Image (cartoon, rainbow, N blue to C red):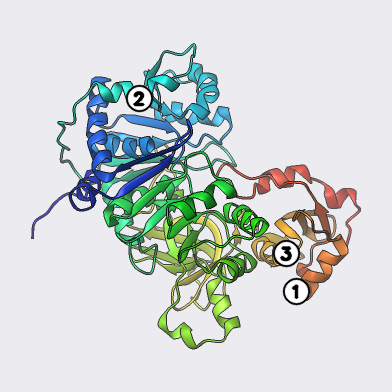
Amino acid sequence: MMQRPLLVSSLIRHADACHGDTEIVTRLTEGGLHRYTYRDSHRRARQLARVWQRLGVQAGDRVGTLAWNNHRHFEIYFATSGMGAICHTVNPRLFPEQVAYIIGHAEDAVVCFDLTFLKLVEAVAPKCPSVRHWVAMTDRAHLPASALPLLCSEDLLAAEGDGYEWPEFDELTAAALCYTSGTTGNPKGVLYSHRATLLHAYAINLPDVMGLSARDTVLPVVPMFHVNAWGIPYAAPQAGAKLVLPGPGLDGASLCELYCAEKVTITAGVPTIWLNTLAHLREKNLRLPLPHRTIIGGSAASAALIHALEGEQGIEVRHGWGMTETSPAGTINTFKAKHAGWPAERRDAVHCTQGRILPGIELRIVDEEGRELPRDGRAFGQLQARGHWVCGGYFRMPGEPQLADGWFNTGDVATLDEDGYMRIVDRTKDIIKSGGEWISSVELENVALGHPAVALAAVVGLPHPRWEERPLLVVVKRPGHDVTAEQMLDFLRAKVAKWWLPDAVVFADAIPLTATGKIYKTKLREIHAGFYMKAGGAG
């Protein structure tokens, strides 16, 4: 058989050759919509590769981005990786000190940024000596004044032709670099090879995963700086799906406008995005016009959210799990044929897991001594992964992560059943140990979210003078709704074990979120430190 390297450039070449007239639609940072095709995008990516050559970017160099989901960011993905350099997406929602650390640790040679992030760039630039060029992703008319010597991306492209041939090289060459969110310690870099990226794209395009096709219109709400938008920028051109990029407009109203106008059939995002979108749909009494499916990941989606999306909007919810270190997809939840005849309660129990293991990935759970536990859906232990797109080491951190017999420790506590369905019980650092028993903060949150007055809920374990730790429930109420602490506890009593019941409920205007939209439990524990100790061990 022929042996051809699995390279990122093959994806955009295929999209040009077979889906050249399929649209890519962007909501611009400057305002308005931009439309063009995969063929146009491929041409501009080739021009951009020539730009990088002119700016002295070499194979293996890092090109950083601080950017929203838009067509220019998409072009950077392919131009950079296609020429043999490394596309390094930096999360602009991190603290400036972390952004400077990440750019410095990666030694980015060029950083491209959207206008939204000019002040951030100006703040971190003095701390980033490796960066030779700061490129504003805009046209001359919108180029901002700055003390930095900025380059204009559209001017750079206009000066180059598209006569560029993608080189061939080893498929194990690095294509992209993403850093973990770094809520504890410095962020860690995960370097993705071309081979891993292509295999991941093939896997998520399987029917029981995301299942993109040339008949789909996909809108990734998950940012392109969050684990490469879960692989969608690679999977969409591979499948020939129309791509809608929402730019900075991630509020419910802006997203719903695009869903309707562009006839979106599939989306992907974290639960908090869908909670906000659902609130907008309810407020305006709207229903999305087309059959729609969504991939929800990043943190566990509650049964209440899944039922609301499916019942009120007819949206098929595919719950998923992954992490930066798994590229990220590890599991996606779709039913098997045997589930069709199951009663609703049993189907719900399956539907609310994080889904089945993807082909190309292996998962197992182990106890504290590293012994593998049974896949019976009840035993829970530390979740470990290995596979074609699983991290084997962190960028420029020799000896990290420490693999367990070739398995990566995910930091999650989970169950597995005989069909490969995985359920996250908690993060290792977030599971609550009370009186020698384990309590899942995730399951408590999901039950609390079922109360009609609750918009967002978080549970953290806090030190307790008698029980070691006890759960504290923090609740954000839905606008126009009210609930007391005792009413919340009454609601929970009927649904969880007595000893799981939080000792207290605290109401807040907002719950802190991480840079990737997850509940920031480290910050919550800081805010409520000593709560039960000061309260004299309530409960």
Query: Is 435 situated above or below 176?
Result: below
Q: Where is mark 1, residue-wise?
A: 497
Q: Which circle's residue, 3 or 2, is located before the other in the chain?
A: 2
Q: Where is mark 3, residue-wise?
A: 448
For numbered disc 2, what is the local secondary structure?
Answer: helix
Which three-letter amino acid code belongs to the residue tagged 3?
Ala
Q: Quadrant of residue 202?
A: bottom left
Label 1 crowd bin: few (<14), some (14–19), many (20+), radius 10 Å = few
Label 3 crowd bin: few (<14), some (14–19), many (20+), radius 10 Å = many
For numbered disc 3, what is the local secondary structure?
Answer: helix
**Distance from label 1 to label 3 (Cα)?**
14 Å
Q: Is residue 487 left or right of residue 330?
A: right
Q: Position of residue 319 (x, y in %)?
A: 50, 64
Can residue 396 be seen in the rendering of this structure? no
- Closest to the observer, 35 or 166: 35
Q: Position of residue 299 (x, y in %)?
A: 57, 56
For this orientation, the residue located farthest to the top is 147
Which three-letter amino acid code belongs to the residue tagged 2?
Ser
